[in-house]
Image (spheres, rainbow, N blue to C red):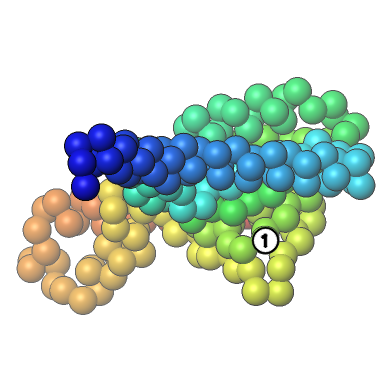
Amino acid sequence: MNQPDISGFFNLLWFLFIFFFVIWPFWKRSLLNREREAMIRLIEKKYNARVITMIHRQEGLSFFSFAFMKFINIEDSEKILRAIRMTPEDMPIVMILHTPGGLALAASQIASALARHKSKVMVIVPHYAMSGGTLIALSADEIIMDHNAVLGPVDPQIGQMPAASIIKVLDAKKPEDIDDETMIMADVSKKAIEQMESFVYEL
């Protein structure tokens, strides 16, 4: 094989690398977004409603298409609260939820805004809405789920640990065997659970 042939071969490899690891993921994402937008328009037409989506699926969008999971955050609440405010009071809202949960504050803001909306609010859960996603779903007048879709417990997290599990330490150990930091975390956990129970009851 001569030098020009080797150069052409490596150019082809480089092109294929660029295509499959850079262009293809974004092109595929663009197609998916167009399909979603078309489906949203159909749902809006069917229900004569404003459709709002929160879809946190595992995505591969980095340079090497490594997958990452998204969660409910403050940016989500800002966008969704803006969409709710822009929806006329007499227009129903259909929210499509697919999320593993996330920040309790953001989920609470969204749930409160949906609960205050004067017209009907419907939540559609095609696959799962866990934790904060369940909290948002509970604010709706109607929840539509696939037969295999699931909701999860509304469980406050203290750092990376479930509040209920931290409190369990108080039952498993004597007070003198528990360090100060754990005692403080358990107290915060109790308050977080009480606050969440009160919030869900008010919904």
Question: Residue at position x 72%, y 30% from top?
Answer: 84
Q: Amino acid at mark 1?
A: Pro
Question: Residue at position x 55%, y 39% from top?
Answer: 27
Q: Label 1, on which residue?
A: 126
Give whichever of 48, 178 is nearer the camera.
Answer: 48
Q: Please provide percent x and percent y for residue 201.
A: 62, 54
Query: Image quarter for residue 149?
Result: bottom right
Left or right of residue 179, residue 113 in this image: right
Q: Can you see residue 103? A: no
Q: In this picture, is 100 found above or below 53? A: below
Give whichever of 191, 89 is nearer the camera.
Answer: 89
Left or right of residue 158, residue 85 in this image: right
Question: Residue at position x 85%, y 29% from top?
Answer: 89
Q: Please provide percent x and percent y for residue 48.
A: 91, 40
Quick one: label 1, few (<14), some, or many (20+) residues within 10 Å? some
Secondary element under disc 1, as helix, strand or loop, is loop
Q: In this picture, is 156 found above or below 54? A: below
Q: Please provide percent x and percent y for residue 153.
A: 51, 64
Give whichever of 128, 119 is nearer the camera.
Answer: 128
Left or right of residue 14, residue 87 in this image: right
